[in-house]
Image (tube, helix red, strand yellow):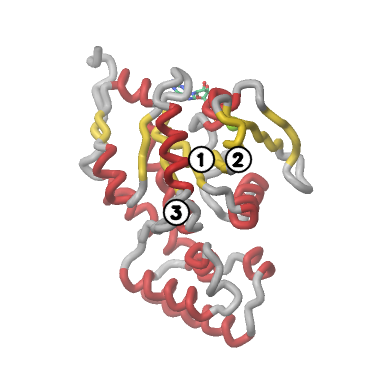
Amino acid sequence: MAITIALAGNPNSGKSTLFNKLTGSNQYVGNWPGVTVEKKTGEYTKDKNIKFTDLPGIYSLSPYTLEEVVSRDYLLNERPDVIIDVIDATNIERNLYLATQLSELRIPLVLAFNMMDIVRKNGDKINTKEIAKSLNCEVVEVSAIKNENIDALVEAAIKKASDKNTKEIKSFSSSLEEYIDTIENSVESIKDHPSKRWLAIKLFENDEKIEEEFIITEKEKSLIDEIRIKAEKEFDDDAEGIITDQRYNFVTKITKGNIKKGVVGLST
Ligand code: GDP
Ligand code: MG
């Protein structure tokens, strides 16, 4: 049976390098529907039933750039069997901001801590086990450029693809979790959607594209507005700011003490 694996991640995290190692010359280049953003798909060199898609680099699943819209439409509508989030391990905090969002889609997720060769060279120490535990997510350390641990990464992704117990990362404070939960369970058109948590967060943020794509009744809309106004007062910020802020807080919390930067030049 064929398995589809999407490579997502920030720009320059090494997605294309990894994609090239995985697929070799079994690549197809086209365009994403309706836009001029390049779409690359390919088959695993060791098993043509495993298909990879190299997604455009993004920092978030917002609707503001073409790359973000392409990536989120693909993930939400095509639903790959598993996402590999390619993370630049020399910059974990920044890269995990996207991971929290990918996790909300409830598509099986594996994190690849890439560029481990540089991490080693810099003498940085990452407590990958602890970070993985807090994220409820499998993390595989790799170096795409040195072809290190790539097979183990694919193996972890395949294993994850058949995992029916995909868990989201719950990154928010208890009151915000409650607001999102209420939206999740009140809007009829998203209630049974596998990515309902992510959709509820987008509705909370007033994401117009999602509001257009799903049927939201007047009554549901006023409930969402009511929740948003209440939260904005409580947190003294706009809805998007609240979400961004809490994501960063979560990432700071789970990485704290688990990343130690080496002194460049002193490492051997
Ligand atoms: P993308 O934007 O995510 O597709 O990133 P690329 O694959 O284009 O890689 C960005 C840069 O990082 C390139 O110069 C790569 O050669 C480099 N790179 C990718 N993976 C690794 C790695 O594991 N180790 C090192 N040292 N460099 C890497
Ligand atoms: Mg690329």
Q: Please report contact status of discs 2 and 1: CB closer than 8 Å, yes or no.
A: yes
Q: Which residue is mark 1?
A: 9
Q: How far is disc 2 from disc 1 in space, using C-alphas? A: 8 Å
- Residue in front for this viewpoint, 24 or 29: 24
Where residue 93 sits, quadrant-wise, is: top left
Query: Residue 103 has which mark?
Result: 3
Mark 3 or 2, nearer chain start:
2
Instruction: Compare marks 1 and 3 and give the one earlier in the sequence.
Output: 1
Q: CA distance from mark 3 to mark 2?
A: 16 Å
Task: Give left or right: position of 172 versus 73.
Answer: left
Q: Residue furthest top?
A: 268
In contact (CB < 8 Å): disc 3 and disc 2: no
Considering the numbered disc 3 on the image, is that residue within a helix, a strand or a loop? helix
Q: Which residue is mark 2?
A: 55
Q: Amino acid at mark 1?
A: Gly
Q: Quadrant of residue 247?
A: bottom left
Alpha carbon separation for disc pair 1 and 3: 12 Å
Instruction: State which mark lies toward you, 1 or 3.
Output: 3
**Which type of secondary structure does the marked residue at label 2 adopt?**
loop
